[in-house]
Every structure is written in structure tokens, then in C-alpha cells.
Amino acid sequence: MKILLVEDEVLIAMEQSFYLETAGHEVHGPASTSEKALVLAQEVKPDLALVDIHLAQGSSGIDAARRMTAMGIPCLFVTSYREEVEPTREYGVGCLPKPFSQTSLVSAVEAVSAILDGRTPTKVPDTMELFS
């Protein structure tokens, strides 16, 4: 799966990249602002974007997710600020809270992949919330 990381914390982005590439995914980014995320999304055309809520320069991951969703790119929030995300498919498939483990991140991506393929996910991390 081609995944775009929208994350302004370099170490977290490196951790996500490592976990996802180890699982066989193609990772792009990180984009540290919503503007950079939208430019990269248009260039890369990812299958999924993993989006933090609070980004660099005061930009919003929620705004980026809304715009990417309108472009046909599904978004999964990966954030410490779960309470700021309304559980709606308008701009996201779900939310995985930080901190995450390698297993929970990879399982969350696999669950979203199953949903996008019209399948029922077999393994959803306990901490992950799927939006309806």
C-alpha cells in the first residue's frame, strides 16, 4: 500500500516509516504542514494518509484530511488528540491514538485496507476507533 505520512514530529515519522516499510508498505513524506501534505498527496496519489492533528506552523491535520478525503484519499488519524476528532467518515476512516506500537500501527493500516477493499477487518487494535 502507498502511504503518505502527515506528521511534524521527525522521530515519530521515522518510527512510522520504519514500521510500515518493514511490513512492506511504500511510505512517502513526512509532510509537516497541511499545505505540504496536499502538495505531496497530489504528486504521490497515496492509497492512504496517516494524519496527525496538530501540525507545524499552526496548521491543522483535520483540514488536510478533509481536503484529501475530497480528493479520494482515505485518512487515518494517528494522534494524541483523539478528543479533537469527530468520528465521521467525512474526513477520516478512523483514529489510532499515540503512543502506538509497531503491531498496532501495522494492524490499523491492515484494518483500513480491508475496509477500503470492502472486507471485514480480521484484526483491529483495541485502541483504534473506526468511524461510521
Image (cartoon, rainbow, N blue to C red):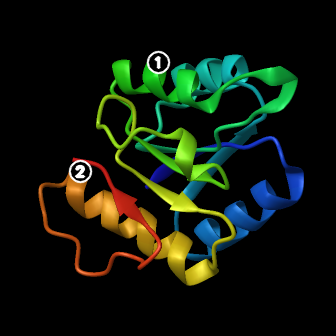
Task: Identify the residue shown where x is 51% and y is 61%.
Answer: 96
Disc 2 to disc 1, C-alpha distance: 18 Å
In which quarter of the view is residue 34 placed?
A: top right
On the image, the x and y values in percent for residue 79 come to 63, 52
The residue to which callout 2 is attached is 116
Q: How many marks?
A: 2
* Label disc, if present, on residue 28 of the rendered structure: none
| Of the pair 65 and 20, the residue shown nearer to us | 65
* Helix, strand or loop under label 1: helix
Looking at the image, which residue is at 73% across and 43% down? 7
Query: Quick one: which residue is furthest to the front in this view?
Result: 83
Q: Residue at x 46, y 18 (%)?
A: 67
Check residue 67 in the rendering and tell me which mark sits there, or answer none.
Answer: 1
Specify few, some or many for label 2: CA neighbours under 10 Å numbering under 14, 14-19, or 20 or more: some
Residue 35 rendering spot, x and y as whole percentages: 69, 16
Q: Is residue 17 left or right of residue 38?
A: right
Up/down of 81 relative to 113, above or below:
above
**Relative vertical location of residue 42 with respect to residue 53 in this rendering, above or below:** above
Write down the quadrant of residue 120 in the picture. bottom left
Q: Can you tell which of label 2 and label 1 is closer to the viewer?
A: 1
Residues 27 and 68: in front is 68
Which quadrant of the figure contains the N terminus?
bottom left
- Residue 119 is left or right of residue 92, and the answer is left
Graded by Cα atoms within 10 Å as few (under 14), some (14 to 19) or many (20 or more), the crowding at tag 1 reads: some
Residue drawn at the location 87% of the way across and 60% of the way down: 11
| Image position, residue 112 (x, y; %) | 33, 58
Residue type indicated by callout 1: Arg
**Helix, strand or loop for disc 2:** helix
In primary-sequence order, the first of circles 2 and 1 is 1
Identify which amino acid the numbered label 2 is placed on: Leu
Q: Where is residue 16 in the image (x, y as percent from the top left)?
A: 68, 63
- Judged left or right of residue 52, residue 89 is left
